[in-house]
Image (cartoon, coloured by chain):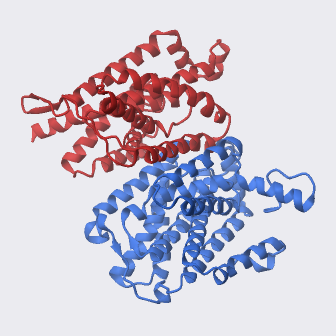
Chain colours: A red, B blue
Amino acid sequence: MLATVAQAIVNGLLIGGIYALVSIGVTLIFGVVKIVNFAQGEFVMIGMYISFFLATRFGIDPLASLAVSMPVLFVVGILLQHFLIRRVLALGDMPQIFLTFALSLLLINVALLLFTANYRTVQTPYTEMAIHLGPLYVAVGKLIAFVVAMVLSAVLWVFLHATDLGKAMRAAAQNRDVAMLMGINPDRVFCVAVGVALALAGAAGSLLMPFYPAYPLVGQVFVLMAFVAVVLGTLGNVTGALIASLMMGVAESLGIQFVGADSGLIVVFLMLLLTLAFRPSGLFGGWTR
Amino acid sequence: MLGLRRWRRPWLGVLAAIALMLPLVVSKPFAIDIFIRVLLFAFIGVAWNLMGGYAKQLSLGHAAYFGLGAYTSTILQIRFGISPWIGMFAGGMVAMAASLPIGAVCFRLRGPYFAISTIATAQVLMLLFLKFRDFAWGAEGTTLPNLGNAPLMMQFDAKAAYYYIALALLAIGLAITYRIERSRMGYYLMALGEDEDAAEAIGVNVLRIKRQVYLISAFLTALAGTFYVQYIYFIDPNTAFSFNVSVEAALVSIVGGIGTLWGPVVGTVLLEATSALLQSWLGSSHGGVQLTVYSLILIAVILWRPSGLLGVLTEAYGRIAYAGPSREREGPLDG
């Protein structure tokens, strides 16, 4: 029993690392640009397809293809901010919500047209490998994904706290007008924030590829998790999103273990609804960034 | 039903006459099918628009009420032999009851997070109905018993009958919206939609208004759910709580003109016509084409015409009818 619980917690933490990459991206865009990116999951999907095609056409390991997917999505993010999001920033809720929502629909359906709905998988030497730690079983692909995800989160934290651009980004997130008065160029900061967020989504895609199938709707799985994590972790709070993602991974995994294979999402959604009912500002409401 | 005494607008009479005559002139089942889809989705759009358009509470979870309406009437019919005509209203009541706790939770959030929490509620309901194997047939769903021509059980041989039901639903939806638009509640809704904090500051009980309009919107959406299962003779959680229903409800309103009486109708006609053309042009084998085009239209509308296409139409109509400068918000359609 104890071993089952421990195993479920380990599995949850490992997948929670991936959720963290997606939700940090969502919360970063929300914090800085004040937009909820409904298409964040679709950029995970694009990252997965990039890794899939690099692996099947050129035999490049999905982990190595991080070096492609992250820069490509960083550039896509800058273009997205510059050509689309920037144009709705002065408008109301409706355009702000439905622009990225429409983008999500568009990317899913274009992927459906180009790649069909088939599940694509990549076999790597470590796909089937696992480490046995006493009674626990740790899949190597997931472990690598978790470790890389945590390293990337740490790098982001250092970037936000130790570089001028990162500090400018946090300043813009706290108070856009004052940040502008201090000489921060908001357009540039916004572009970098969206670029970084999409690069993280791309990284999540590449990291998933060794053990998770790519298909057009795959992003929806991750983006729903990310939204819940971002609400739980208090909107715009990067550390909160990270902790909440790990918690949700664990909650989902325990739900699958003890309620039923198809109940992981129910547990997660109930967590969201309960949080909203009792602590609408998130678990980390009082904390500062 | 549209208030016969108030017909001062000739175009409305023409439109109603065309709508009533259409099945007599066009008898191809394929065409009637498209008309029924247009009427149904326009009706769902009208229901969504009360909530999403006037009050600007952008729900992406109206499938929750569509599904509850569909399941309530089906369960009543198959388990208890109760006519779907009664089931339809029962479904509406169930949806209204469900909207209270859902609203209580979701109204704590604003803007995008309200939208996300409504997605979550519809998903939770779908997952729950997937689990209710004994009571609601689980994932396999069920077909409705075919009783032949049984008007009392909302089953008809003629497709035209379904057409007229859908038309009546749309007329009811439009009449209710028309009434609300001109009532005290309508002004509260618009105030709330413009600026929630300001509305609250001047004494609008924002939470109560949201709750009330959500009740109406949920009720109407549930009627559509019942009608839809009666029309396709089949129900399962993926159809009843389909995310596409939530999406299309919002989409038709936004494309047509959010927060306007006729916006959802214009939007549905445009989108469904596009979709029908695409289908006849490409065949139905290309999954994804329809939504690709929908999303491109949506992006175009958001970037260039966030008030929707109805505005374009009224301006054109204004130019033709009055040969004068067009009026921005209060076009001749609702002036």
Please name the residue shown 42% across and 61% down the image. Answer: B241
The correct choice, above or below, for B28 with respect to B274 in the image is below
Quick one: A165 or A202, which is closer to the camera? A202
Please indicate whether residue B267 sits to the left or right of residue A284 in the image: right
Please name the residue shown 70% across and 50% down the image. Answer: B191
Residue A221 in picture, x, y percent from top left: 37, 43
Please name the residue shown 84% across and 73% down the image. Answer: B8
Residue A1 in picture, x, y percent from top left: 9, 42
Residue B109 visible in image: no
Residue B320 in picture, x, y percent from top left: 88, 60
The correct choice, above or below, for B25 with respect to A289 in the image is below
Quick one: B246 or B305, which is closer to the camera? B305
Please indicate whether residue B256 sits to the left or right of residue A195 in the image: right
Residue B322 in picture, x, y percent from top left: 92, 60
Please indicate whether residue B323 sits to the left or right of residue B45 in the image: right
Q: In the picture, which quadrant includes the N terminus of chain B?
A: bottom right
Please indicate whether residue A189 sits to the left or right of residue A267 in the image: right
Residue B206 visible in image: yes
The correct choice, above or below, for B74 with respect to B294 in the image is below
Q: Quadrant of residue B16?
A: bottom right
The correct choice, above or below, for A170 with respect to B214 in the image is above
Q: In the picture, which quadrant includes the C terminus of chain B?
A: bottom right
Q: Quadrant of residue A252?
A: top left
Callout count:
0
**Residue extending furthest left?**
A134
